[in-house]
Amino acid sequence: MASVVPVVDESADRGDEFLDVVERPRADSTRLSQDPEGLYEGWNRLGQPRRALDYGASVTSTPREAETRIGPVGALLCRLVFLAICLPGPVLLAVALTLDPPPPPTDVGGLLAGGVLTTIVGVGFGAFGWRLVTRSRRDARRLSAAGVAATAEVLTVANHLGGEDPGLELHLRISGPGFATFEADVIRADDPGLVPGALLTAVVDPTDRLFAIT
């Protein structure tokens, strides 16, 4: 009597591996379109972005308060202002180098020195402001897309004397779903309602503890 040899379908054991190989190119090709802000840390077999929170990634980053929120129109106006701040220096340099007839050497030296100094100061300040606006918009988009509602309890209140506008330095304990409770410090204007034990509403991105007090 002929023996029966069982046939094992090894493709079933390699099904996940095969699916990963097939789907990985699609995930790579859609990564920029689906995740322009770099909010995700992985990709599932269907080529969809997968947040770190979905598979229990540990959070080691320091909590950071989001930049002051700026709307789209405000961001556009701010960028135009910062761009205008960058322009005078290069324009002065171009004028100094292209005047016809050329000015006396002493005048050329003054124009060049002024152009270089204005360019360094203007471009540096404009680039710094542009970066702040970009960071503010990025933080707002992240919290809008991935933020969860949280509660911030005021633990301590101290006077903050730094800067032009004195205010209050609050030490907060922030808790909510999807992330471990953490503590952070924020600066706020004087408000009689800001006392130890007061509860404030907050929004937190659980992946890196970016937060905003609303």
Image (cartoon, rainbow, N blue to C red):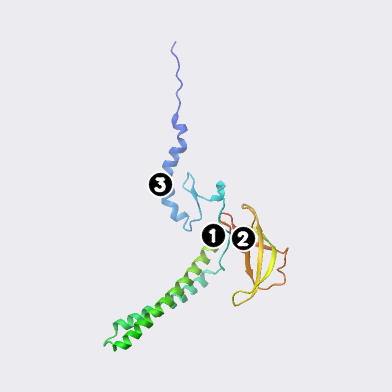
Tell which circle, 3 or 1, labels the residue nearer the N-terminal end.
3
- Of callouts 2 and 1, which one flags the residue occurring earlier in the amino acid sequence? 1
Location of residue 213 by image quarter:
bottom right
Q: Earlier in the sequence, mark 2 or mark 3?
A: 3
Q: Quadrant of the N terminus?
A: top left
Q: Which residue is mark 1?
A: 142
Q: Residue at x 53, y 62 (%)?
A: 141
Q: Residue furthest top?
A: 1
Using the image, tell me which numbered label, if any, was put on residue 122. Answer: none
CB-based contact (under 8 Å), mark 2 and mark 1: no
Q: CA distance from mark 2 to mark 1?
A: 10 Å
Q: In the shown orientation, is residue 27 left or right of residue 187?
A: left
Q: Nearer the viewer, residue 32 or 113?
A: 113
Percent coordinates x, y for residue 15 in the rendering: 46, 35
Q: Secondary structure at mark 2?
A: strand
Residue 110 is drawn in which quadrant?
Answer: bottom left
User: On the image, numbered disc 2 is attached to which residue?
Assistant: 203
The residue pinned by badge 3 equals 25
Q: What is the x, y in percent for residue 133?
A: 50, 69
Q: In what element is the residue under mark 1?
A: helix
